[in-house]
Image (spheres, helix red, strand yellow):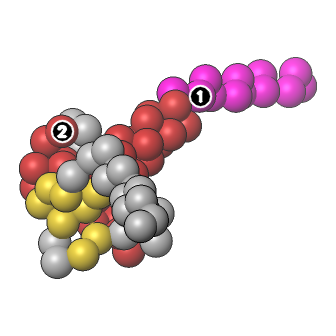
Amino acid sequence: MQPAPETPEPPEGHWVTIADGAKMVNRSKRMIYRWIEQDRIQAYGGCVWTPDLFELADRMSRRRGRPRQPKEPPAEK
């Protein structure tokens, strides 16, 4: 008799509603909906997968944290 095939481990994470996910990453529901519209994250039945949500929120916060380029001083006349 052959041993039973190993079952893959379930992925870490769970599905949460968009409202709960927005609270978890300290963003607005509208921002989560924008990410869905822009295909940055997938939603099924009004729920998002938490690892994807945290990864995207982390990436976007680093992006928002970039220092602005200094403005050029006005040219001397």
Judge left or right: residue 40 versus residue 12: right
Label 2 belongs to which residue? 24
Q: Give the farthest residue toward the bottom.
A: 45
> Which sits in the foreground, 31 or 21?
21
Q: Residue at x 38, y 74 (%)?
A: 37
Q: Quadrant of residue 47?
A: bottom left
> Which sits in the foreground, 77 or 17?
17
Which secondary structure is most common in the magenta stretch? loop
Is 71 above or below relative to 51? above
> Which sits in the foreground, 12 or 9?
9
**x and y percent of residue 66 in the render?**
59, 28
Label 1 belongs to which residue? 66
Q: Which badge, 1 or 2, comes first in the chain's sequence? A: 2
Q: Secondary structure at mark 1?
A: loop
The verdict on residue 75 being magenta is yes
Judge left or right: residue 8 versus residue 46: right
**x and y percent of residue 40 in the render?**
46, 63
Judge left or right: residue 45 versus residue 48: left
Q: Quadrant of residue 69?
A: top right
Q: Is residue 53 visible?
A: no
Q: Residues within 10 Å of mark 1 (few under 14, many from 20)?
A: few
Which quadrant: the N terminus?
bottom left
Which quadrant: the C terminus?
top right
Q: Residue at x 10, y 50 (%)?
A: 20
Residue type for callout 1: Arg
**x and y percent of residue 50 in the render?**
28, 49
Q: Residue at x 19, y 58 (%)?
A: 15
Q: Is residue 54 visible?
A: yes
Residue type for callout 2: Met
Residue range (magenta) = 65-77
Q: Secondary structure at mark 2?
A: helix
Please give the label number shown on residue 75.
none
